[in-house]
Each structure stands twice: as C-alpha cells, then as structure tokens.
Image: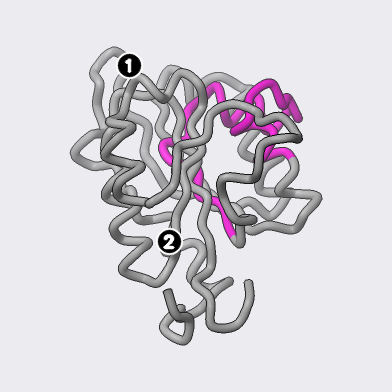
C-alpha cells in the first residue's frame, strides 16, 4: 500500500445463489476508502450481473488466467475478501488446489503475506462433512480470518437475508485501521 493511494481489495466471488449481492460489499468497501476489483470463480459469473459489478468497481471482472502478453487488469491486492465462500472453494483452497484464477490467487496470498478474510456460505449438510472443519482449521493456521456465518438448511436457498456481506471488512479493519488517511 503506497501512501496517499487507496488500498486495493480483491473480492473473490464464488458460485452461489446469493452472489448477486456482492454490490453491497463493494459499496461498503468504497465507503471505507478501498478500491475494489472482483475475481470470480468461472461458475460465479452466471450468478451476478457482470456489467453492474464492472460499472461499480471501474475494473473488469477477472475469472480466467491471462497470458503474459496481456497487461495486469488490476493493481496488486493489499487484502482479499472471499464472499460468498463456498464449500468447494474453501476445501480446494485449503488443499492447495489452484485450478482456477480465484484459487490461484488465494493459494499465492499466503506466500505473499496478503491478509485474507472469508465469509463462508454453506449449508448445514456441507458443514457437517469432516473435510470442511479440517479446511477451516488449515486456513486459520494460515492466518486467514474467517467470518461467523451460521450454515443454512440444505435445499433451502437460505441465508440470503442473513448473510453478512460486510463482515469481511470488520475482520480486515484491525489490520488496516482507519483508511481515512488514504486518498482515492
């Protein structure tokens, strides 16, 4: 993070029925002084209004690897928020699987020392699987900050009204403090 420049937040969006609510986090992050770029899992693209997200952030949504001849479309991340963090993404990330751009960025974040905050979105049947608790434990051991989402009932499409999009900002705040000294 360079003095007098807004810090840059990558928002990793996973495929779920609530992914279209990501604008709430983007607006809150902007209000706190962050610039925001969205990295979507390939499946997440079908769950959100790509044009609206790009208009809101001012950056293209990234979901695929770029070739070396193409310029970086986003500045480097000062922090990463993973919302909604699905069962699939949490488990693959904890296992070190890097088969999408989003997972590649998350796997590299640990080695780069980039702070990461996660707000899970899983149902209670998924949360009961032993791999999920093990994955959360591994991510915590990597200093990933994990939100307090209570799993919803399977097949309910639940959680939409109770999902806290901005909790990741609460988790990152102790690391970054007040951003009011940064200019956008």
Color theme of the render: one colour
Query: Where does label 1 land, which residue?
Result: 154
Residue at position x 28%, y 31% in the image: 49
Residue 134 can be seen in this image: no
Q: Residue 150 at x, y = what percent?
A: 36, 38
State the extent of the magenta-drawn residues as a range: 79-107
Q: Residue furthest front?
A: 69
From the viewer's side, name the closer residue of 153 and 44. 44
Q: Residue furthest left?
A: 161
Residue at position x 58%, y 31% in the image: 90
| Left or right: residue 39 compared with residue 17 | right
Mark carried by residue 169: 2
Mark carried by residue 165: none
- Neighbour class for label 1 at 10 Å: few (<14), some, many (≥20)? few
Q: In this view, does 23 lie above or below 121?
A: below
From the viewer's side, name the closer residue of 34 and 73. 73
Q: Residue furthest bottom?
A: 181
Quadrant (top left, top right, bottom left, bottom right) of the C terminus: bottom left
């Amino acid at each position: 993070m360079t003095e007098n420049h807004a810090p840059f937040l990558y928002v990793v969006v996973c495929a779920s029925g609530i992914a279209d609510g990501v604008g709430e986090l983007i607006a809150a992050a902007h209000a706190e002084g962050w610039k925001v770029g969205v990295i979507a899992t390939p499946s997440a693209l079908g769950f959100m209004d790509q044009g609206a997200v790009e208009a809101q952030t001012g950056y293209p949504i990234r979901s695929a690897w770029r070739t070396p001849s193409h310029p970086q479309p986003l500045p480097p991340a000062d922090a990463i928020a993973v919302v909604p963090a699905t069962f699939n993404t949490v488990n693959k990330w904890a296992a070190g699987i890097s088969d999408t751009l989003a997972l590649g960025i998350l796997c590299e974040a640990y080695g780069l020392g980039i702070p990461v905050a996660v707000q899970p979105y899983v149902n209670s049947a998924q949360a009961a699987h032993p791999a999920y608790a093990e994955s959360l434990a591994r991510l915590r051991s990597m200093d990933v900050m994990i939100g307090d989402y209570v799993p919803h009932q399977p097949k309910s499409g639940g959680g939409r009204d109770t999902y806290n999009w901005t909790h990741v900002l609460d988790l990152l705040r102790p690391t970054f403090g007040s951003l009011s000294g940064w200019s956008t």
